[in-house]
Image: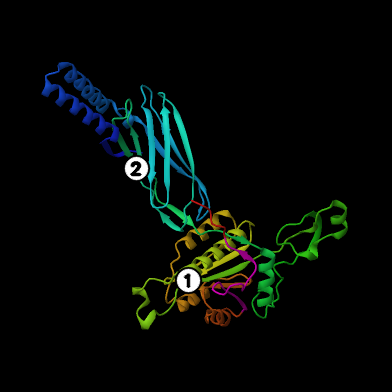
Amino acid sequence: MGKAATTFRVTREGWIWLAAAAGLWGTGAYKGMNLITLLASLLLAVWLLNVLLAGRRLPRLRCHWRVERPVFAGTPFGLEIEVEAPAGPAPVGVRLESQGPQHALAWFLTRLAGGDRVRLRQAVTLPQRGWYSWTALHLSSGYPHGLAERGVLVEPAGPTLVFPPLGRLHRGRLRRYLVQAAPSGGGACGRPCRLPAAQTEFHALRSFRPGDSPRWIHWRTSARRGELMVREFEDMPTDNLVLVLEPWLGDQGPGGRNPSLLPPEPRALAALEDAVSLAATICWDWCRQQGDRFVLAVAGRAPAVLGGVTGKDFGLVLLESLALVRGEATPDAGGLLERLDATPLPPAPVLLVSTRAGDLGDRLAGRLHRPVALVDVSVPGAYDFFERATPHAP
């Protein structure tokens, strides 16, 4: 990456050195002591030499940023800086720093030989979802005496899209929640369909995994092996899902004032982030299993509907959309219903994740002609299939 600017400063030690040289020179000149004047001149010469040599070879270095993706809010990820020194003399004692609102990077290289390539790695944690802009990387060196320091600014990496924080999803509990809220198993009314957890032909035994139904446990084999073993089935049916997110932040401020002119309440913001985190966790968990049909609908100011077949690539598309979700005082429910009408939906359960117990669930059920399971994240203990992400220290 190219260099944006150069910097120069006299260090605190350099100012003390200059003050000492000036004091000695003044004393020598006042008292006519040539030896003291000569010593002051030597100190000044050393200082000037440091000014000339400090960071002289820094512009020859080449630095490249690498950010591990995907990046989730609240989860550490690796950030790597590759420093390449071209053939020939290389700088000594190089400090690399980048300070931003949510990151602090710092390394020190004692020596680089010509042609060397060094990779510097540091774990970074970004607490908020959305776009994050990195600050320039500052390379500086005060070699040989540290009395003056010259540096260069390396252009930062491009902005990084931070995905919502992921929690832990208990898929079996979520399935039971969908079945309880939608007794028909999540299919369209009047159309027979298999339950998402239904299986067909018995195939083999395997270890118990979170989300497996207790009905699948083979107790005799479990007792013999000392661990829970479940029946594995062939010809797994599809596990489709329609997920709707309503990012509501409140419709009226105190005294009836326009909510767009007021900052959202902390509780409303926290509920919104919980809803987005829950939706992101469901999307990412569902896309670990390939081949199912999944639809994500967001009732924002500009309603969006994303449909596709589950897989890692489609999961990243869903997370990108959720990372940029903004809370709305008046979500466009009508526009969302029109978009859903124009989208071919698979026979699947409909799960509505919202920050309130509004009428959107009833409107969805009436328009789609199928039951809708509502999750109101503002009600503590309303659901047990999701554990919020554990915050990490930055």
Q: Seen from this angle, which residue lies furthest front?
A: 31
203 or 190: nearer the viewer: 203
4 with respect to 274 (left or right): left
State the residue at coordinates (62%, 65%). Answer: 386
Give the prevailing secondary structure in the magenta stretch: loop
Q: Residue tagged by mark 2?
A: 155
Q: Residues within 10 Å of mark 1 (few under 14, many from 20)?
A: few
Specify whether residue 11 is in view.
Answer: no
- Asked if one can make out residue 13 in the rendered structure from this viewpoint, the answer is yes
Task: Please tell me whether residue 73 is drawn above or below residue 10 in the rendered image.
Answer: below
Any mark on residue 7, and which? none
Q: Which residues are magenta?
A: 370-388
Q: Is residue 341 magenta?
A: no
Quarter occupied by the N terminus = top left
Place of residue 176 in the rendered image (x, y in percent of width and height, measured from the top left)? 69, 71
Say if the magenta span includes residue 383. yes
Q: Indicate the amino acid at tag 1.
A: Arg
The residue shown at (31%, 32%) is: 59
Color theme of the render: rainbow
N-terminal label among 1 and 2: 2
* Vertical position of residue 18 compared to residue 235: above or below: above
Q: Which residue is mark 1?
A: 267
Q: What separation in Å lies between label 1 and label 2 (alpha carbons)?
A: 38 Å
Q: Secondary structure at mark 2?
A: loop
